[in-house]
Amino acid sequence: MYQATLLNVRAEGLVALWKGLIPTLWRDVPFSGMYWMGYEMLKNHFHNKLEMQHTFMTDTPYTLNMKNAFYVGFISGAISGTFASILTHPFDVLKTRRQSILIGIGNSSKTKMQQREDASFKNSLKIILKTNGFKGLFAGITARLAKVPLACATMISVYEAGKSVFNQI
């Protein structure tokens, strides 16, 4: 890994370390914004439902326990991760296409300049829409939905359960 990084920096300078940053930000910033906003809304909704149910059935005040924190976090994280994944998937497709073109530079009959132009977001979008239509922007969505919501749910539910435990100490 170190050798590859060193070769890359020698060939292209320090800028090589930041290649792909902009497309990654185009995908990850909206994803994070949507995920966290959706997560907080869902978490509050489910906690309010649990509190209303608890208050209706007992005379004791509602306190959040680890089990509820885990389940609410898991469900809220999975739902929010699903919607954020679907809405930002076109950016992921464009980023992946751009990366595959840039990796292949030099292995084509086109000049490096032509290949870099093909890899631009605008041209990638045009090519995908022309070749596969709107559905081309959702290529691979099944694989992403098999991974991302579960990862989001696991991460946030463990965090919320741990937070609940430490708040009781």
Image (spheres, grey):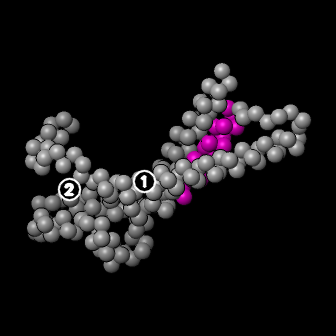
Is 143 left, or right, of 73 in this rendering?
Answer: left
The answer to which quarter of the image holds residue 57 is top right
Is 103 left, or right, of 37 in this rendering?
Answer: left
Residue 78 can be seen in this image: no
Nearer the observer, 1 or 59 = 59
Magenta residues, start to end: 66-83
Q: State whether residue 42 is above or below residue 163.
A: below
Tell me if mark 2 has few (under 14), some (14-19) or many (20+) residues whose alpha carbon lies within 10 angstroms of its own.
Answer: few
Distance (Cα) linking label 2 and label 1:
24 Å
Q: Which residue is mark 1?
A: 29
Q: Which mark is residue 106?
A: none
Q: State whether residue 63 is above or below residue 30.
A: above
Nearer the observer, 132 or 31 = 31
In the picture, which quadrant includes the C terminus? top right
Name the residue type under label 2: Ile
Question: Magenta part mainly helix, strand or loop?
Answer: helix
User: x%, y% of residue 34?
Assistant: 52, 55
Q: State whether residue 165 is above or below residue 46.
A: above
Q: Is residue 96 within the magenta segment? A: no
The residue at the far top in this view is: 169
* Residue at figure coordinates x 37%, y 58% from the top left: 26
Q: Which residue is mark 2?
A: 103
